[in-house]
Amino acid sequence: MKLQKFKEEKKNQKSIIIFTIACVLLITGVFLYKTFATFQVIENEDLINGDVSDPGDIYFVFYKDNQLTKEMPQKGTGYAYDYEKSHCEVPGKEESKAVPYFDSIDWSVTVRGMTERPTKCTIYFYQGYQEGILKGADPVLERPLVPVHIDEKGKVTKADPSEEWYNYEQKEWANAVILVDETKQYEENEIIEEKDIESYFVWIPRYRYQLKESEATFNTYSSIMNPETYKIQNVEEFYSKIEGGNKGKNEAFVIEFENITETPSDGTNEEKWLTHPAFTSFNSNGFWVGKFETGYNQSDNSTKEITTTNWTKANAENTSNTNKEEPTKVIIKPNVYSWRNINASNAFYTSYNYQRELESHMMKNTEWGAVAYLSQSKYGRCNGSTCEEVRINNNGNYITGYSAKNAPTVGTSAYNNTDSVTLNQDGTNGYHYGSNNASKQESSTTGNYSGIYDMSGGAYEYVMGMMKGSTTTSSPASGANKDWNSGFKGLYSDCNENGGSIECNGNIMNTTGKDWPNSKYYDLYDHKTTSVEYQRGYLGDATKEFGPFYSVNWLKEGSSYSTRYVGSYNANESYFVRSGAPWFIRGSVYSGGTDAGVGAFNANTGGVVKDYSFRVVLTP
């Protein structure tokens, strides 16, 4: 008899876990024990067909390459779980509410939603495609994700996961979509119409990266700002004047992919290796990132349609109901308006509730860093020692996937060329996603359609990275004050700005807001009062490693512009969280010029702002 590991978890968070024949039932925090009938791979044809008098509560049937087998294939033998074919049923009935899920790390099956017994689950495995350089950190496919190819025109077809459908060595990242109607089935290589796609996601494989020498751009030290202010005409002049010259602009991250079974690298200084913390915090082999900034669907996805008629950017300025988030309103697509005007707590819980079975959540600051570093490597926008910057989305209507025709040369909004065209149109200064006029996808992290968009310009993006509420607490700040905050409970960060004073317009904290999630969902930073105390950054979060930092006064045709703080990497804006602005925002905005980029970081209150959006991450 071959005993298998089995888990059952109902949607109301009750769970049953069976190891061999014993299980633990967790109900409202009380552990109860119950013994079920032993289950195993059944070879008896009557049992496989469901003709059984007493099979116990649940039993499994396994298939490898469509052939009945006595046991699950062993981990590491090249087999992948077929989530489309795998299913559960109640013998004698056509349908069952039970749904199987597969944990590729534990190599175990989880069944959720089981309401009737006996239940039979048929689990399929196939020889899946794996890319050698990923060393086992290949994409994890789970329902409702559908693997896809995106061709050089942006056309989407369903991929066959048993054949090559991604190639990171050739800068072709793995893509998957979630359909509006998740029950709809497609054949391999069949075109998937844009109207049928609710969301696009891109896989970021687990990797480690090499920390650089202290004098290099990717600085492992505090990267204190140089006090001198440079008065310059453009970015090239900036690089000719700063210490180290053009070195920072061109330097690529050295990355090696790794599997979760490997001992994580824990380097802290130059020439050492560090497993990126975005993967260790979730103990994952990688994660799926929203391919675009999150959009707002003005129709209800339960109607199996996405309505784009009469859309304007104002339609997507939706603060969301403060008591009930709207995951059915989430769309992650090109050529839609970015969802803005939403505070950080609503953005988080909207993301959190979007695909709970896939561990959906709002992007963390370190997860932004993981994407940024991969984009600035040979697997993204670098060739040899030279790296191209991800091009700015310069569309003033906050349309996703848009790309400027030319790279900005000045880091100010006053002198940057922007467009305000509507959906699916090219402008004077930019191209829409899918445009026949765009020879390269310059605003993509790969330079082609397989990459991630809107990480430079578009809307600012709130990330789950914030400052502590005071110098004496380890709890996150809710926001700046009672008028400007995230909606989470907690201290207002500018209350302690003046040497211990705790007054803040008569309020010192938000006591009625939303509860904070588990700490794995956010990155927390020390409380400080100024935006140039960069030493608080973490390795991996794309802040201090993009230093040293400088004060720059951009000049244009004899006119001056306000002084800016920028990093030595692509001269992106660099303002750390501080009193009065305890929440990180990333990427800058459509009018940011050279301030915008994957290395750009700034700060705000966590509150509702019309040009602030957010991004969804899945960690199945």
Image: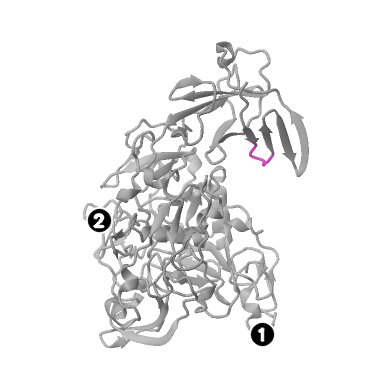
Position above or below: 314 against 237: above
Using the rendered view, name the quadrant where residue 292 is placed.
bottom left
Left or right of residue 557, residue 175 in this image? right
Left or right of residue 504, residue 146 in this image? left
Q: Position of residue 193 (x, y in %)?
A: 34, 40
Write the residue at 51% across / 66% down.
268
Left or right of residue 517, residue 188 in this image? left
Q: Position of residue 378 (x, y in %)?
A: 33, 57
Write the residue at 31% across / 80% down.
238
Q: Quadrant of the N terminus?
A: top right
Instruction: Determine crowd level at label 1: few under 14, some 14-19, many 20+ residues with C-alpha closer than 10 A.
Output: few
The amino acid beneath tag 1 is Gly
Q: Distance between the residues labelled 1 and 2?
A: 53 Å
Q: Name the residue under label 1.
A: 499
Left or right of residue 142, residue 394 in this image? left
Count of marks, rendered view: 2
The amino acid beneath tag 2 is Lys
Instruction: Determine crowd level at label 2: few under 14, some 14-19, many 20+ residues with C-alpha closer than 10 A.
Output: some
- The extreme front residue here reads 271
Question: Which numbered disc, 1 or 2, marks the residue that appears first in the sequence?
Answer: 2
CB contact under 8 Å: marks 1 and 2 = no
Q: Nearer the viewer, residue 501 or 337?
A: 501
Mark drawn on residue 440: 2
